[in-house]
Image: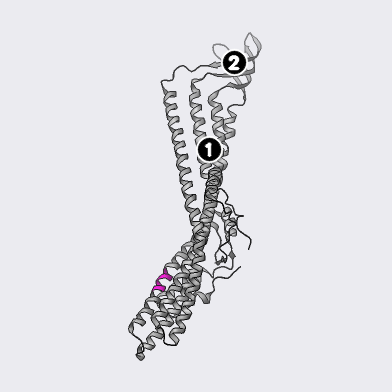
Amino acid sequence: MTKLFSKKALKLCYFSHPKIIAISTLVVGIFTTSAYSFDLKEAWKAAETHSSELQKNRYEFEANQQQLPITRAALLPQIGANISYQKQKQSLPSSITRNSQSWRVSASQTIFNLNKWYKYQGSKFAVIAAENQFDLAKQQLLLRVAEAYFNALIAQESLITIQKAQQSFLTQQRQAEAQFKKGATTIVDVQEAQTGYESAVADEIEVTSQLVQANAQLKTYTGLDIDQIEQINDYNLINFPWYTSEQWIQLVDKNNFEIKLQAAVTEQTKQELKAIQAYHVPTIEMSTGLYRNPNDYQSNDLIQDYDTKASYIGVGLSIPIFSGGETRAQTKQANATYLAAKSELDMIREKTHLSATENFAKVRAGKMRIKALEKLVLTSKTKVSSSTLGQKYGLLNNTDKIRAEKEYYEAQLKLTQAKYEYLQAQLNLMQLAGLFNINILNPH
């Protein structure tokens, strides 16, 4: 694991500017509270067990899974038993005692009920929808973890670049002030160096705030005590499949969890529509049972015991005739709900296609942009060396050196940003295509 930060690096050049002493204390405090360093895969694993949001989604999934056995139970035999005992004493006008007992066992079985059948079929799609909802929530959480992780790295790397730029601008400012006092340069050179330094100070304040926010998000998602995040030195971090745009769209149609979720919801509403339409259809149910009722009767002049036993079996036919228009209204309502679900499925498919196309373009352009910015950083660094040499021999002035430093500093920041935007676009595209999991990272 690469150590990205140290107290010495964080304190770099702070001694010279009182405006950022507080920032120095804050950032050093953040990165010295623990000795644990983790990479992106470890952050993902931690989030899977720590996130309260994902835990909620997991329980909701478990609850929705019970819809299937609940609706299936209505199609299975219903068996019940009943036992009772009663003792009655009468004193006037004569003394009478009655003891009554009974027990009953009954069973019923649905023979034909389309309403219950379609509800059972709908519950299958409800379980599928719940499963896809959970998988989608899990992937969205991991994407947010990756985004916070990348944002933290962007802020950390940018902070180091800014601190080095501050030190350089501060040195240039002091040199310009010394030369100005000797009359060897103008006040413009001093102000140019001062402007560069103050600009770096402002950037540092902003980037430090971004770093604090990213680390807070990571801690919320993962529960990890953050000392430092393992640096990513290779932007080919992800085992990314290089498909064409058309192939990515095909994968999105086949594997995207949001599309699969809405497709299951659409099928569920279709079955609910059929279930309501089935209220017009007769139902058949069979029932059977056995009961016994032993009794005894005692009075002053009579004692009598009698016992009743019986069994029965029957088939009932229920024919719906008129319900005041309720079934018709429910059918219209369910049909509108089904059509709305179909329309939403089309909307989600269009949205995911667009998002896949956008992220594909970002990935394709991102790789070329990184290479271009790497060349720019190298060129800017060479320009800084050349301007330093030119200044030494009087061919260039202090302003030229400061401008070269600014260009180098800005190129480094752009490269850092581009590298992690490229990685995030890869993850987004793989998630849309259903290829995203915690094992997609290349080994170190």
Q: Which residue does the numbered mark 1 point to in the structure image? A: 264
In which image quadrant can residue 242 be found? bottom right
Residue nearest the observer in this picture, 435 or 231 = 435
Q: Is residue 278 visible?
A: yes
Residue 168 image point, x, y percent: 45, 79
At label 1, the amino acid type is Ala
Q: Is residue 152 visible?
A: no
Report the Cα–Cα distance between label 2 and label 1: 36 Å
Q: Which residues are magenta?
A: 199-205
Residue 411 image point, x, y percent: 46, 70
In which image quadrant can residue 285 be found? top right
Residue nearest the observer in this picture, 181 or 131 = 181
In which image quadrant can residue 179 be found? bottom left
Residue nearest the observer in this picture, 45 or 83 = 45
* Mark in front: 2 vs 1: 1
Q: Main secondary structure of the magenta part?
A: helix
Q: Which residue does the numbered mark 2 point to in the structure image? A: 315
- Relative placement, left or right, of 32 versus 184 is right
Q: Quadrant of the C terminus?
A: bottom right
- Label 1: how many Cα within 10 Å (few below 14, some 14–19, many 20+): many
Please name the residue shown 42% across and 67% down the image.
Answer: 206
Labels 2 & 1 near each other (Cβ < 8 A): no
Residue 177 image point, x, y percent: 37, 86
Please name the residue shown 65% across and 10% down the image.
Answer: 304
Please name the residue shown 43% across and 73% down the image.
Answer: 407
Colour scheme of the rendered structure: one colour
